[in-house]
Image: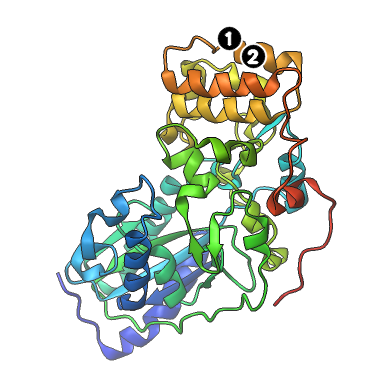
Amino acid sequence: MVAILEPAGASELPGLIKCWGQALGFQQVGIADTDLAAAESRLNRWLDASRQGEMQYMGRHGEKRSRPCALIPGTRSVISARMDYLPEPMTSVWQALREPTQGFVSRYALGRDYHKVLRQRLQRLAERLAERVGPFGFRVFVDSAPVLEKPLAQKAGLGWIGKHTNLVNSRAGSWFFLGEIYTDLPLTADQPATDHCGRCSACLQACPTGAIVAPYQLDARRCISYLTIELKGPIPLGLRTAMGNRIYGCDDCQLVCPWNRFARISTEGDFRPRHGLDRGELVRLFAWSEEDFLRHTEGSAIRRIGYLAWLRNLAVALGNAPRSPRATAALATRAAHPSALVREHVAWALACQAPGSMTADEQPLSAGERSARGSNEAPPPIP
């Protein structure tokens, strides 16, 4: 179905959509056209360099990812929306990252699975729009299909893609989720957001593993979010120490971004931390059985990595933790685990915990590690 709007109705719809979106809990809603030619070129260069690692799905769908009409025929406009998720002040996030006996979970994953929250709200927004214009063609997406959500959000005026490749908003920072409605409505597009990173390079310097290989260029194969979530096999030896206590995702590049001084704490109850995962002790989390893991991650994005990757990540964090009898005893309980993946990482961690070995605290620190463990110095000035 291709919707046809009267000129008067078309002119007022963008404003109404934004008002309805904010009433549904989105902090900002914008409208983009479907021309993603520039983003398509960047994506192809990234894929050609094999920087996607094991994420083969990034190139699996061909032009459908960068050409909305190829994914959903008849798409004429994209409604893009963002929703804040930061559950606590950034000073508290820094404190959690600096506690080596606790597992650090990326703040987006502490509450209810964002896919479900945003999808339901976007569906309600589309239904509200249908009440106004009548039946029309649409599809709702929240990181659930081959969609270039960040380039679309930039075209919709929600922010620009920063040097760390996350979307940044000059009034709200970057701690927010994105979702889209592909529609056949001929809506007037917003002005794209412009880049305001300037000369700032804080995110490049802060990345613990050097995954931001150049401004606006991310090598996912080195990114801790990729290593702890997307990677299914062993974590490369040369990157394990730099992971520190990060057991699911990484927030360092956002923590040092000066624009995040404008970030606001989310008011969404669904994004509040569950099961103490914002301050989870490594030994306690490592002791979870698979049943414990499934129960404590029900309705959470964390569950998608599976129990074995969970133990793998925790083993690395325990190996990086200060030497202690408790850490060694916890690791020893998994030394003969049925999974070769788990056994390998436990053996590495036990070697790190052995007397005479160099602990993570004793090894030379990267710029990102120095930032994470250093003083509460002020972030760089706004570019």
Q: Position of residue 82 (x, y in %)?
A: 50, 63
Q: Nearer the viewer, residue 8 or 271?
A: 271
Tell me the tag on residue 333.
1
Of the 4 image quadrants, the one containing the C terminus is bottom right
Q: Position of residue 164 (x, y in %)?
A: 56, 63
In terms of secondary structure, where does tag 2 sit? helix
Q: Residue at x 40, y 76 (%)?
A: 31
Q: Residue at x 65, y 25 (%)?
A: 318
Left or right of 115 in this view: 382 = right
Left or right of 285 in this view: 140 = left
Tell me the tag on residue 313.
none
- Report if the CB atoms under discs 2 and 1 are less than 8 Å apart: yes
Quarter of the rendering containing residue 338: top left
- Characterize the local packing of mark 2: few (<14), some (14-19) or many (20 or more) Cα atoms within 10 angstroms: some
Q: Position of residue 169 (x, y in %)?
A: 59, 70
Q: Amino acid at mark 2?
A: Ala
Single out the residue that lies furthest toward the left.
1
Q: Amino acid at mark 1?
A: Thr
Q: Position of residue 179 (x, y in %)?
A: 42, 60
In terms of secondary structure, where does tag 1 sit? loop
- Is residue 193 shown to the viewer in this render? yes
**Where is 241 relative to 170, above or below?**
above
The tally of labels here is 2
Question: Which residue has dot 2 on it?
Answer: 330
Single out the residue that lies furthest toward the bottom.
7
Quarter of the rendering containing residue 201: bottom right
Q: Residue at x 29, y 50 (%)?
A: 57
Q: CA distance from mark 2 to mark 1?
A: 6 Å
Quarter of the rendering containing residue 36: bottom left
**Where is 328 relative to 371, above or below?**
above
**Where is 252 relative to 174, above or below?**
above
